[in-house]
Amino acid sequence: MFPTINNFWKVIIAIIIFFILWVIWHYLGSIVAYILSAAFLTMLGTPLMGMLRGLRIGKFQIPKAACALIVIVGFYALLTSFIALFVPLIVEQINLLSNIDIDKGLKNVESSIYQFNDFLKKYQLGGEADPVDQIKTALQKFFNTENIFNIFGTAFGFLGNIVSIITALFAVTFIWFFFLTDNELLYKYSSMFVPDQYERGFDNVISTSRNLLTRYIFGILVQLCFVTIFVTSGMFVFDVKYALLIGFFAGLANIIPYIGPLIGLTFALFVAVTTNLSMDFTSQMLPLVLKIGAVFALMQTVDNILLQPIIFSNSVKAHPLEIFIIILVAGTLAGVGGMIIAIPFYTIIRVVAKEFLSEFKLVQTLTEDI
């Protein structure tokens, strides 16, 4: 059965709205990003705002503006503490990498390299050049101060543009303050563009989206804390240097669905190997690598069984396969950034579709659990 004219025009209007949103993002992306960042921080800060507003001394109640300032100052104090903790570790790691004794490290793994090269030659996969010399040349090019700073500079390139960072921080903080003091502010400005006949549906979209996204965000924070503590503890147990740095990086990387754990594992192995090149490869280095791999494998198992079903499925009310396909599409279209925002963005689309396009069977199927 074909959709009615009314439904047809609903689809057309929805397409036009998404096209307008895309144009706005394309030309005013930074401003939209400031507003979305402030909205995200507001969802995190709202529970603390409620606690502060609930404190009373007699008839005195802390004003909203003071509560908002306490939340913002507390957030930046926590952020500053993290930076003060991890930046010296990163700088120390850079200096350590730039002073690595390549010759000494290669001697420990030389026999293993030749064995592996003989294996490749047996199946006509290796070349005739000396593999140790090739690796040594490559490492000498890689492990020099200029290259290392370039690598870390690329990874943290956004820190280089101080003016842009200050502008972004000021804009986000300014917007965040007013969102905290008036949590209906974003709703008020958004509802101005909604026709009267759709106000009730718009209210439902805002309420449902806020509920689902709040649960999702707090689930992500729980996941980040779990991964950080788990990996850090594992690194301490196996006496791996920079355990806290590895654990925190693993927690942050884990925010990227599916490929995040691999990024965290790669970083952990990189740090462990480069800080222990003096170890004997067979009796010490290889067991250490296997232990680190075991920590990440166990962490990922627990994460997949306990946390991800709650965060990626129950919190946003979507099937795991559905989530996987959406993340895959987002990663193809927009890279890692797309994978990170895929689930929140898809959640909002589903809520809007259920409210305004519920006549379609596809929408009914995808939104039946919301």
Image (cartoon, rainbow, N blue to C red):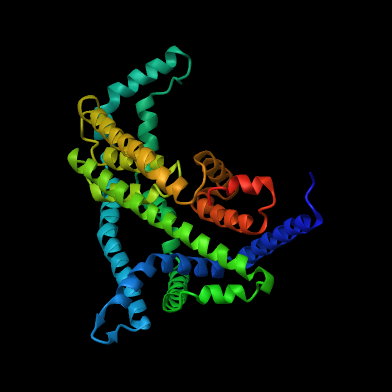
Inspect this view and state whether residue 140 appears. Answer: no
The residue closer to the viewer here, 155 or 252, is 252
Task: Point out the residue furthest to the bottom here.
Answer: 59
Inspect this view and state whether residue 285 appears. Answer: yes
The residue closer to the viewer here, 363 or 230, is 363
Instruction: Please give the name of the residue rendered at 32% of the width and 38% of the height, measured from the top-left corner.
Output: 296
Instruction: Please give the name of the residue rendered at 38% of the width and 16% of the height, measured from the top-left corner.
Output: 118
Q: In this view, does 194 lie to the left or right of 218?
A: right
Instruction: Please give the name of the residue rendered at 47% of the width and 68% of the height, measured from the top-left corner.
Output: 39
Residue 9 percent across, percent down from the top left: 77, 59
**How many discs mark residues in the rendered view?**
0
Q: Quadrant of the N terminus?
A: top right
Residue 244's place in the image compared with 33, above or below, is above
Residue 87's place in the image compared with 236, above or below, is below
The residue closer to the viewer here, 163 or 225, is 225
Residue 128 percent across, percent down from the top left: 44, 19
Residue 265 percent across, percent down from the top left: 35, 40
Picture quarter containing residue 166? bottom left
Q: In this view, does 80 lie to the left or right of 6?
A: left
The residue closer to the viewer here, 110 or 194, is 194
Residue 278 percent across, percent down from the top left: 21, 35
Instruction: Please give the name of the residue rendered at 75% of the width and 58% of the height, measured from the top-left corner.
Output: 12
Q: In this view, does 367 lie to the left or right of 163?
A: right
Task: Point out the residue furthest to the top here.
Answer: 122
